[in-house]
Image: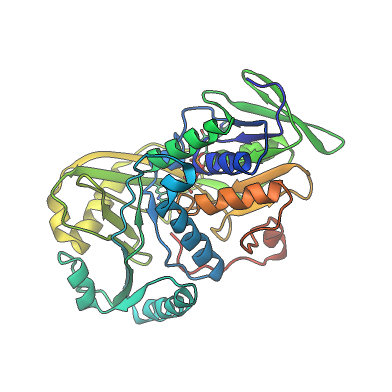
Amino acid sequence: MKSKADAVIIGGGVIGLAIAYNLAKKGMDDIVVLEREYLGSGATGRCGAGIRQQWGTEMNCRLARKSMDIFENMNELLETKMDIELKQQGYLLLAFSDKEMEQFRKNLELQARENIPSREVTPEEAKEIVPHLNIDDVAGGTFCPTDGHANPFLVVKAYEDAARRLGVEINTFTEAIDITKEAGRITGVQTDKGFIATDKVVNAAGGYSCQIGEMVGLDLPVKPERHEILVTERVEPFQGPMVMSFSYNIYCQQTPGGPFLMGFGDPDEPASFNRKSSWHFLEEMARKTYKLLPPLGELRVVRQWAGLYNITPDRQPIITESKEVPGFYMAIGFSGHGFMIAPMTGILMAEMILGEDLSLDINLDLERFEKGDLILEPSVV
Ligand SMILES: Cc1cc2nc3c(=O)[nH]c(=O)nc-3n(C[C@H](O)[C@H](O)[C@H](O)COP(=O)(O)OP(=O)(O)OC[C@H]3O[C@@H](n4cnc5c(N)ncnc54)[C@H](O)[C@@H]3O)c2cc1C
């Protein structure tokens, strides 16, 4: 392991690796990634890996659309032949009330301005797109045919390989245990395998990002929250798009190869590092799915697991440098959408660290929480 680095990135999930790759591509020499387990062992390897561009704020539409461009061209951009299993068969977002549908229409106007090819669908049109959908209580919906899904492990591997080729040192099973400072500035990272001198540290530790904040004396407004998910047996492909609803609280898609992947967010889930699966989730998931997508009720569940969302008060990320601790960067708090915007996050964070102009206007700093200036994104899970 290097004893000196230009930047140390804590966290070997999709965010940490995308940042490492982009920094190296822009010419930074000595970059070290620390991952205390294996790459993708955190939320990244446990996530639904859905990629949707149907958002309700300009910033999120842009982050998602530009990230989708990168997913679509990943082989060329990362110079890899790896198939990341990108499947673009759309997201069908369902509304269950007129009020929700009104919000969807506002989102559509915004998305049209951002060149996102989404459109409104009636309940009957929704059923044409997903014939086994029960539209009894459905008020309408929106559909974007270029939304989709990719394999999170293969995306992680693509970034890992590209970063290593550019000289990034990636240390797995290596834990950051402290960050040292002198006169308010970062001087290095103490790991369980040795010390690395550096003046730049990136907190990309997902659900554990609050612990990394504590290492530099910051009480970050982020908390971990368990989210559960399950996968069924393989069956012949019969559902192209992801079916999702914010109010009915469900997402469900058929992945390449045949298994269905589905989950929901329990509104009563307390903040914790708990990553255990629960019987309650299995029961509730089965109940919801059986009602909305009846034939799926016949499928056998092969596996269920849980991962941590990293939640901020407005469920939007923090992508910034600390004003209190210069050299301490954060790409954290991604809630349920960090995978889909990781490609742009990697670029923006690299630009920020190198002092370049940002290629996209974002306002994801820490100060918004103190000012009460929260981002009002209506389409978040
Ligand atoms: C059930 C579920 C479903 C989801 N579905 C979607 C979806 O469909 N689409 C989407 O875009 N997003 C989804 N998400 C969210 C998405 O998974 C995350 O936002 C994203 O993966 C965050 O990536 P990350 O690299 O920041 O965090 P992580 O992948 O959690 O990586 C952080 C890493 O830091 C490591 N680490 C922590 N502390 C230390 C330390 N002290 N030293 C060294 N390493 C450390 C951890 O081991 C971990 O591997 C979902 C999440 C869950 C849990």
Marks counted in the figure total 0
Residue 250: name its quadrant: bottom left
Image coordinates of residue 14 in percent, x first then y, are 49, 42
Q: Residue furthest top?
A: 193
In this rendering, is residue 372 above or below 161? below
Residue 183: name its quadrant: top right
256 and 337: which one is in front?
Answer: 256
Tell me which residue sits at (72%, 42%) in the image.
328
Q: Is residue 280 visible?
A: no
Q: Residue furthest right?
A: 183
Tell me which residue sits at (50%, 53%) in the image.
335
261 and 249: which one is in front?
Answer: 261
What's the coloring here?
rainbow
237 and 168: which one is in front?
Answer: 168
- In what quadrant of the picture does the C terminus appear? bottom left
Image coordinates of residue 108 in percent, x first then y, are 42, 77
Q: Is residue 109 left or right of residue 360?
A: left
In this rendering, is residue 191 above or below 358? above
Q: Is residue 228 left or right of residue 4?
A: left
Image coordinates of residue 41 in percent, x first then y, are 44, 34
Q: Is residue 143 visible?
A: yes
Image coordinates of residue 321 in percent, x first then y, are 71, 49
In this rendering, is residue 99 above or below 90? below
Q: Is residue 142 left or right of residue 69?
A: left
Tell me which residue sits at (62%, 59%) in the image.
359
In this rendering, is residue 91 above or below 272? below
- In what quadrant of the picture does the N terminus appear? top right
